[in-house]
Amino acid sequence: GQQLNQSPQSMFIQEGEDVSMNCTSSSIFNTWLWYKQDPGEGPVLLIALYKAGELTSNGRLTAQFGITRKDSFLNISASIPSDVGIYFCAGRRGTSYGKLTFGQGTILTVHP
Amino acid sequence: DVKVTQSSRYLVKRTGEKVFLECVQDMDHENMFWYRQDPGLGLRLIYFSYDVKMKEKGDIPEGYSVSREKKERFSLILESASTNQTSMYLCASSSTVKGEAFFGQGTRLTVV
């Protein structure tokens, strides 16, 4: 099945740094979602985006729904050690019974 | 608080056994999904269901079946477990209107 192009695949950063990751697709999506997965746990929804150009924040996290509807971005400001984990993007088309297409994930490591 | 509950966190089964993974959601969601997650392969959709007794194959349905007799419950069945089905299994649910998927905590299955 199709997957979204998510980059970077991994990041090693110092505590306090800002982080940016993105997802791109050749197809248009009506919804973009960002998840975080801690080791051994299920993904947890961080941010949901429903309109092209929408910019939404959740604490230190900010995500944007690209104007072309083919991409989305997630930024984490002032990273802390508990930000460690895998971040996934997911997109949903309009007529897919809620089926999501996922990116491969970005593995984030934060050094204290 | 939304909740998707998987019946087991860890399972160890023998090759050839019939295995049942159960998932229950309390959000009255129409859609339910089963994914498996393997290192380097991301989240792969096995089956999904958009209504009671309805099911659709995902990207990797071979060796699996599903059952949805009640709206809140979606079961994944491994008819004859094999070692290549050792994986992390994730259940999720979503509403057709919003599309945000909520995941369970995952079941790590080992087939020996």
Image (spheres, rainbow, N blue to C red):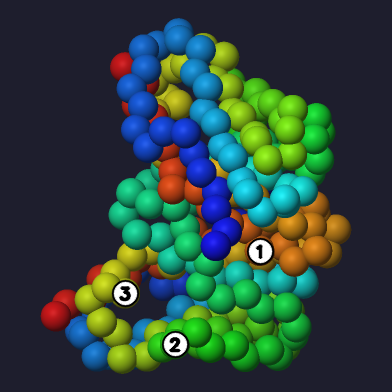
Above or below, B24 relative to B80: below
Q: Mark 3 points at which residue?
A: A83
- Amino acid carrying label 1: it is Glu
Give the residue at the far left of this rendering: A112
Give the residue at the far right of this rendering: A95
Left or right of A49 in this view: A17: left
Same-subunit check for callouts 3 and 1? no
Left or right of A21 in this view: B66: right
Determine which of the numbered discs, if any, sits on residue B100 in the image.
1
| Pointer 1 with pointer 2, Cβ within 8 A | no
Of residues A71 and A89, the one drawn nearer to the viewer in this rendering? A89
Of residues B57 and B91, the one drawn nearer to the viewer in this rendering? B91
Residue at image point 74% right, 28% down: B69
Of the numbered discs 2 and 3, the one sitting upstream in the chain is 2
Q: Position of residue A15 (x, y in %)?
A: 21, 85
Above or below, A41 relative to B64: below
Above or below, B71 relative to B105: above
**Quadrant of the rendered structure where residue A18 is?**
bottom left
Q: Position of residue A61 (x, y in %)?
A: 45, 85
Residue at image point 40% right, 11% down: B15
Q: Mark 2 points at which residue?
A: A59
